[in-house]
Amino acid sequence: MMDILIKPTKLKGKLNIPPSKSLSHRAVICASLCKGGESIIKNLILSEDIKATVEGMKRLIDKHIHNLVIDCKESGSTLRFLIPISIVLNNQCRFKGSPRLFERPLDIYFDIFNEQNITYKTSKDVPLYVKGNLKAGTYKISGKISSQFISGLFFALPLLSGDSNIIISDSLESRSYVNMTIDVMEKFGVIIKQMNANEFYIRGNQNYISSSYTIEADYSQASFFLAANELGNNIDCLGLNDTSLQGDKEIVDIIKRYKSAEREIVIDASQIPDLVPIISVLASLKNGLTTKIINAGRLRIKESDRLKAISTEMKKIGADINETEDGLIINGVEKLSGGTKVSSWNDHRIAMSLAIAATNCEKEIILENCQAVNKSYPTFWDDYKYLGGEINELNNR
Ligand SMILES: O=C(O)C1=C[C@@H](OP(=O)(O)O)[C@@H](O)[C@H](O)C1
Ligand SMILES: C=C(OP(=O)(O)O)C(=O)O
């Protein structure tokens, strides 16, 4: 575990925004599921999460492995995408990963397993063991816990011989991630048909067809630098696709809203959960403006409880920020004090948000567990230094 001291310096320069983590997971999965032919994926981000998906898919399609164990490390996407695929391809699989990963909900799958007589066990030694056959049919599931369950079923159901329907029983949060799944699958020849806002039709017996796919730049990562610009930094973010399906593209509009907001701004986070930590930093420095972040309950079930993490750490450096049950209320202040130790809570998005906050602190901060960025953006600190950020490494614990 590594701690760093970050001096308050402004960032400036051109930056190639790294490739999208979400699209990287999807392209690796689709390419691995092709029966023949070679796929070429260009611009993959080899972060810890994507390495977990690459390793996991390699093992899943390797017919010589008998006692299949997949290590998902800290990646919710890897676990939730590979569970349904594993029972379709392999009939049984053990999953392991960080303790936090198995605190994050899997109930949607457990309900399906109970209904379909699929065996599953969870224990400390083997966090998850699954055995059985996934059946084609109608799936009624909540869209409020994580869209990753829907994406996971999308990858697996077209491989079954029967047709399936997925009906969202309430509302679908993080919808753009579902749209990204459909889009990448289509590039690999597999069609998910959207019947209406809450219903999807998945024909069985489909084949993934090898393809060439280039991962576009990641709006979730760009959001740190775009918000930084609004706080007096000057970073030229290169490579972003303005017709992207990534929901976090909304950061551009949110920043526009801040430019014209007067007293209060309300941000509904249900479709853009990953933007909340950095929006909190931006909001904290909008003096005289109150930001209410609503519908952000699912932030409590990410790599950390992000509502608690960001409010605790931003308070330490002088922000006026408070948690509600499913959101945050932030009163902008003129300056952040800094001059203290803060923690990433081992969460990449908290670490990167605090790094941007540091550019606006009066005094330096010490960030604990800065290596959390490796989950999605292994070169974050190199890029930060390249842009003029001043960092001293303190220790390796
Ligand atoms: O499918 C994906 O790639 C993701 C979906 C989102 O999760 P939820 O659907 O759980 O909100 C998002 O927060 C996560 O970082 C990546
Ligand atoms: C929540 C995230 O990822 P995952 O759910 O894949 O762990 C994230 O990257 O912010």
Image (cartoon, rainbow, N blue to C red):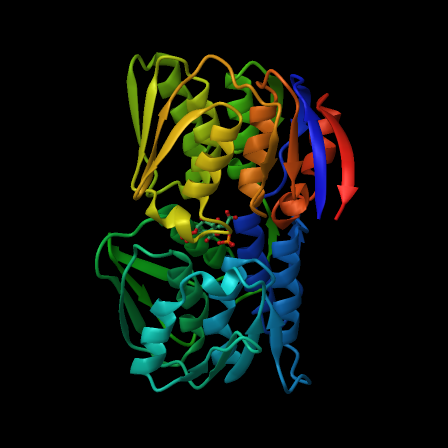
Foreground: 209 or 220? 220
Q: Position of residue 180 (x, y in %)?
A: 44, 50
- Image point (72%, 44%), residue name: 2
The percent position of residue 115, horizontal first and vertical second, equals 29, 81
The quadrant where residue 59 appears: bottom right
* Residue 64 falls left or right of residue 258: right
* Image: 329 above or below 181: above
- Nearest to the observer: residue 234 or residue 388: 388
Q: Is residue 207 visible?
A: no
Question: Would you say 247 lies left or right of 347 here?
Answer: left
Location of residue 389 (image quadrant): top right
Q: Quick check: 198 above or below 355?
A: below
* Left or right side of 307 for 48: right
Comparing 182 with 124, the one in front is 124
Does the rendering let one see residue 248?
A: yes
Q: Is residue 249 above or below residue 335?
A: below
Above or below for 118 versus 84:
below
Left or right of 371 in this view: 318: left
Percent coordinates x, y for residue 122 in the rendering: 47, 77
Question: Measured from the top left, where is residue 111 in percent x and y?
Answer: 32, 74
- Quarter of the image for residue 276 reads top left
Q: How many marks?
A: 0
Nearest the eye: 395 or 385: 395
**In percent of the image, x 48 and y 27: which residue is there?**
281
